[in-house]
Amino acid sequence: MPEGHSVRRLARQFGDVFTGERLAVTSPQGRFSGGAALLDGHTMVAAEAHGKHLFLHFDNALVLHVHLGLYGAWSFGGDRTFSGSSSIGAPRRVGEQESPAGDDAGASYAGPPAPVGAVRVRLASGHGWADLRGATTCETITEAEVRAVLGRLGPDPLRNLRGDAGRFAANLAGRKPTIAALLMDQKIIAGVGNVYRAEVLFRQRLDPYLPGGALGDAAARKLWRDVVNLMSDGVADGRIITTSAKYWTRRNGKTGRVRNADGTLSLPAKTASIPVRADAHYVYKRNGLPCRVCGTMVLAAELVGRNLYWCPVCQHS
């Protein structure tokens, strides 16, 4: 499932390529025909993300609300002018794909291609298109309903509004479920998924089975700050990198940034090669392999329907 940084990049992409554009909105698959008809012919005025939820606002006070879930993905394409700061021209990530059309020498853009597969909704302007497939949620709602959705969600580290750190700490206070379970609860904190959960708990040397209420205010705020830093870097770099450069065995030549647990950058942004995928994480999907720090075998267990990864020594309470 795409985590909060990917949905934030999607919101940025939609804002770049569709804001101020009058859009043709259709449902090639047919399952969203009613909702598409309410938006068809209207102008998109803003795009925003909160956690794993994407909201596309239109000039008729209606909103396209999308939650990708486990299988949802957007694809984009268009002419040479149809480019944004996130998806187009960047490496592919889970939840967003690029297929620029008319960008080859001598080619001209003649509109969106025929839909391929079960396209739930298609947005099209004069310069490009976006197709959605497989989303858990795809609905047209009112601005009041958007506020109701937001009211059910915890603070978003990528918004990091004044008071959010305290709100997160208060959401944990007195809670008996484990901190690993609570980090996956979108009412506690919005946007954290399985990768960030495993990695931030390791970076903070927290036992994943520690009750959330046992964490304490100071430790909760420190955890919040690390999540804010890591997810912000994920937005900038288009991938999740949590390890310090000293644990990298190989680098892929691309530039990026790596955030240490204390919030500092381990290598200068824009000049440091980023690690190959196998070196990007401390514990996520590394069960059975030695911990990068202490050498103990990384463990895995199912918790709240997802696999949890941790080092029993580094994260011993």
Image (spheres, rainbow, N blue to C red):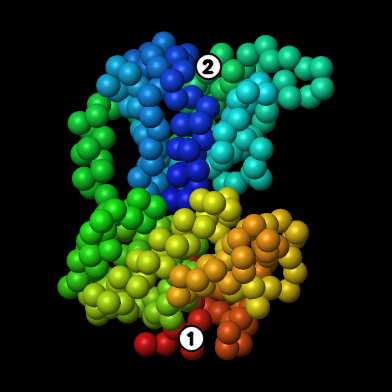
**For mark 1, does the 10 Å Cα neighbourhood hold few (<14), some (14 to 19), or many (20 or more) residues?**
some
Residue 49 higher or lower than 33, as above or below: below
Q: Residue furthest right?
A: 105
Whether residue 300 sits left or right of residue 174 in the image: it is right
Badge 2 marks a residue whose secondary structure is loop
Q: CA distance from mark 1 to mark 2?
A: 52 Å
Residue 125, position in %: x, y? 53, 16
Residue 83, position in %: x, y? 60, 30
Disc on the earlier residue, 1 or 2? 2
Q: Amino acid at mark 1?
A: Cys
Per the rendering, the mark at residue 283 is none
What residue is pinned by disc 1? 314
Q: Amino acid at mark 2?
A: Ser
Q: Residue at x 17, y 73 (%)?
A: 174
- Whether pointer 1 and pointer 2 mark residues with C-beta atoms closer than 8 Å, the reply is no
Whether residue 131 sits left or right of residue 317 in the image: it is right
Count up the numbered dots. Answer: 2
Residue 34, position in %: x, y? 35, 16
The residue closer to the viewer here, 242 or 192, is 242
Q: Residue at x 56, y 79 (%)?
A: 298
Residue 82 higher or lower than 55, as above or below: above
Badge 1 marks a residue whose secondary structure is loop
* Residue 269 visible, this orientation: yes
Q: Residue at x 55, y 59 (%)?
A: 240
What residue is pinned by disc 2? 125
Based on the displayed image, in which of its 4 quarters is residue 65 positioned? top left
